[in-house]
Amino acid sequence: MLGTAFMAAVVVLFAFGRGQRDLFDIVVAALAFTIPAGWYGSRTQIAAGAGWLSHRTLVRRRWVRTDQIVRVKETPLFMGVLLDLRDSDGRKLFVTSGDLGGDPRLLGQVRADLRTAMGRGLQLSDRARAGLQLDGAKKR
C-alpha cells in the first residue's frame, strides 16, 4: 500500500510539474493508482471451522454456515472458479477456488460440511462436484 501511495504522489507531482494545476486532473490521477490497490492489493483471510466458513477482507467480513448451504453457484474466472455460497439463513459468501485450494485442511473442512449439506438435500452440479472433488469426482 505504501508503494501505491508513493506512485500517487509521483503522479500528483508530475501533474504539478507540467503546469496542469486543475484539481480534477490531480484527483483523477491519484485515484487511478489508489482505487485498484484497494481492490486487488488487499489481503483476504479465509477461515473455517466445524460448520462455518469465513472470508475477511480489508473492508468486510462475511461468513456462512457450510453445513446448512442451500445453493452453490459456480462462475468460471480467468484464474479459477468463483463460488457463490448461500446458507439457509440468507447469508452469502463469495470465495474463489484458489482461496480454498491453498490450504488442504480448509478445503477438507469445507468438503465435509458440503457433504453434510448434500445429505440434507443440497443439489450440486457435476461441475461443482468436480471442482470441489466431492464424491470421487475427477477434477477437470
Image (cartoon, rainbow, N blue to C red):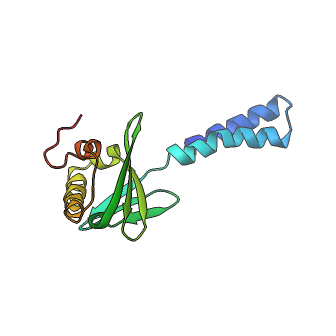
Looking at the picture, does residue 41 appear above or below residue 60?
Answer: above
Q: Please identify the residue farthest to the bottom as the structure is shown.
A: 89
Residue 87 % position (x, y): 36, 65
Tell me if residue 1 can be seen. Answer: no
- The quarter of the displayed image where residue 20 is located: top right
Q: Horizontal placement of 94 versus 50: left or right? A: right
Q: Please identify the residue farthest to the left as the structure is shown.
A: 136
- The quarter of the displayed image where residue 110 is located: bottom left
Residue 25 % position (x, y): 80, 38
Residue 138 % position (x, y): 17, 38
Q: Residue at x 32, y 60 (%)?
A: 47
Tell me if residue 43 can be seen. Answer: yes
Q: Horizontal placement of 47 versus 37: left or right? A: left
Looking at the picture, does residue 49 appear above or below residue 97?
Answer: below
How many numbered markers are drawn? 0
Q: Residue at x 69, y 35 (%)?
A: 10
Residue 82 % position (x, y): 39, 45
- The quarter of the displayed image where residue 56 is located: bottom left
